[in-house]
Image (tube, rainbow, N blue to C red):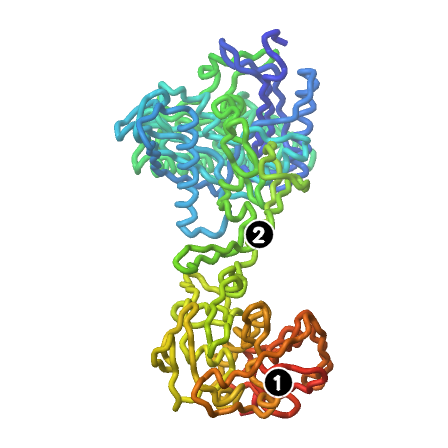
Amino acid sequence: MNEKNPLEDIIFGLDIGTRNVVGTVGYQADDGFHVIAQCVREHQTRSMLDGQIHDIGRVGDTIREVKEVLEEAIGTSLTQVCIAAAGRVLRTVTTQVTYEYPEETVVTGEDLHTLDLMGIDQAQQELLAEGDNRYKFYCVGYSVMKYYLNDELFSSLEGHKANKIDEIIIVTFLPEDVVDGLYSAVERAGLQVANLTLEPIAAINVAIPENFRMLNIALVDVGAGTSDICITRDGSIIAYGMIPFAGDELTEVIVQAYLVDFATAEQIKLDSSTLDEVTYEDIMGISHTVSAEEVWKLTEVVREKMTTEVANKIRELNGDKSVSAAFIVGGGGKIHGYTESLAKKLDIVPERVALRGEEVMKNIIFEQEGIKKDPLLVTPIGICLNYYEQKNNFIMIHFNGEMMKLYDNGHLTVVDAAMQAGFTTEELFPRRGREIHFTVNGTPRMVRGGEGESAVVKMNDVTVGMNTPLEFNCFITIEPSTAGEEAVCTIEELDEYAGNTMAFEVCGKHVMCPKFMEVNGSLEPGSYEIQEGDVIETRSFYTVGQLAEFMDVEVDPDREILVNNRPATLESLIYENFSIDWTVLAFGAAPVQAKETGSQASNILDQLKHASKYGFGSEAQADGGTQAEAPDEAKQAGAGASGGDSPAKETVAEEKAPEEAGLHVTVNHEPVYLSGKSSYIFVDIFNVIDFDVHAGGGRPIVTTINGAPCGYSDELHEGDDILVYWKES
């Protein structure tokens, strides 16, 4: 073996054909491509038809045999292989893509690969848009037809400065099951796919050098099951095509005519192209000898049909016109009369349709003895050479059950594959639930949603991270991340709700009240769930009527109401430290209670509960003492004194309560114990019982102490029997 051949640089290429598997091992050197070992094995059965694997196990066995022969020849193991695909349903898409730079930039090789990927993706989308749902297509190859730099045609872009680059690209697709079958057979032989291309792309790398591609030439790779076609013009490959009609069609005619098995018929066909006479034995064991001309005449009809279909496909791919010349490669093209027949069908002189073999292998050095430079070897060697064009540029992986081809920049990770597969960043990383944006007293406020769950990522059934490097032919599965719960915030959770109070002087007594919260102009309870865009304001004022409702008193409408010693009404606004004087008719009286229906009742009760929680309420607070608003007997009766000229006369002397005392009462026939305060009013029971203050559906709340109607601020005593319920309509 050549000393200049480090084993780590060798390339293993496999041409998995319908009749044969051809393995080639070699390396690229300055003087050309060196083939150091080659092996050809026929399939033992017809495990492939028309270029597609039907029996994965048997094809895998043949590949393994070729691999083992080559490993013995070169003295080292082979783990990765380059392959080419062919198949019945070949689809090509030609598209143009553009990449614009933010500013004038030098074009790099990375930029061109990005442009290629954009073209492949766009071609895939265009193919999907055609609506052919019979197959899931997979990209098996592409060729750039033209490059444009700032809208000017260029042969090469790398190194030039540009604001914009374009390319016209032709992308080839095969059904995923065709590609998957190739991968499965290769894996059965203990190999991983290092590079996948299309058979005509591989063949053209050898058969038609770039300096020939300015001409309008057709390359036809005639195999056993398919005839793959490639067209060049103006320096580029402009089209690919395939017909499922090739050498096996001729062999089957011989099988029927000479009553032989398929392998014997194949040998008759091959011998007829090199010998004058062919000897064979039929299935009855009888030996026969026929002339080569007889075999040619027998297969002539099929040969003519085959060349007619190839010529028609060439014209179709070339814009409904013939080409200037055609090159033939592959074993099927060696049959007698093929080139002459194709030239006739293309309407060009016979000299311009020729087999390509030894003459296109001037830069191929065979180090293994006994190898003849033959058209059969063009595609296998081209598969190896194609690797150098795409070396380290692409890797194949399986992503959530589908095959993907990614440009390998040397540091590909799982997240790169996910992004190319169409995953969004929201699907890859934990997402918070929906945020709520609102304002409080004109200041923007935001409450975040809950954290979601991270995506579950596995490579080859092992849990990995998003930044795990990709491996050749690995199997990736990703379960998308989830979003957290949406943000929820109620008014009572706001600092402004709990921390702000207002003080008034009511009939000479100091009364502390919570500030109300207004949402979008409407008063809302503490349990209100804030919505997106809500405008929340802390109410810095009460009306006289709201203060009376809060204190649970009935104001005599026939007596004068004074605010800061000036006449006022129940609708008058009162602010911090305003003084209010009025005449009280009743404490917790039924007329006031009757007004508290529906949302108004639950709203007031909600505010009172909050006030009780923070030590506010109708207990007038001054100088650290607790002011009782009315004598116990007056509250029990549900009415207060009504005479007197001064509103202050309606307020009796204060009663001192113990600093802290517990209280045993009965609420709705259940014993309840109140603790933590020096004295208790009716609303305190809502801190220890389960009562939904918003479930009334418009009905009024009924409240009694020891059978008598009461207000929310009525004082409680040891042993009181309390009822609270929604009045039946």
Farthest-out residue, top: 3
> Residue at horizontal 47%, vertical 92%?
643
- How far apart are the alpha carbons under marks 2 and 1? 41 Å
Q: Is residue 385 above or below residue 621?
A: above
> Residue at horizontal 66%, vertical 39%?
460
Q: Mark 2 or mark 1: name the one nearer the start of the chain.
A: 2
> Residue at horizontal 57%, vertical 49%?
480
Q: Nearer the viewer, residue 654 or 271?
A: 654
Going by the numbered disc 2, the residue's amino acid type is Glu
Q: Which residue is mark 1?
A: 724
Could you classify mark 2 by the number of other residues whose Cα lies within 10 Å: few (under 14), some (14-19), or many (20 or more)?
some
Q: On the rendered structure, is 287 left or right of 582?
A: right
Q: Nearer the viewer, residue 711 or 510?
A: 510
Could you classify mark 1 by the number of other residues whose Cα lies within 10 Å: few (under 14), some (14-19), or many (20 or more)?
some
Going by the numbered disc 1, the residue's amino acid type is Val
Q: Position of residue 379 (x, y in %)?
A: 51, 25
Q: Nearer the viewer, residue 62 or 423?
A: 423
Q: Position of residue 475 (x, y in %)?
A: 62, 40
What label does residue 290 carry, if any? none
- Looking at the rendered image, the disc whose residue lies closer to the viewer, 2 or 1, is 1
Q: Could you tell me if residue 421 is visible in this image?
A: yes
Q: Secondary structure at mark 2?
A: loop
Q: Secondary structure at mark 1?
A: strand
- Asked which quadrant contains residue 467, the reply is top right
What label does residue 451 carry, if any? 2
The number of discs equals 2
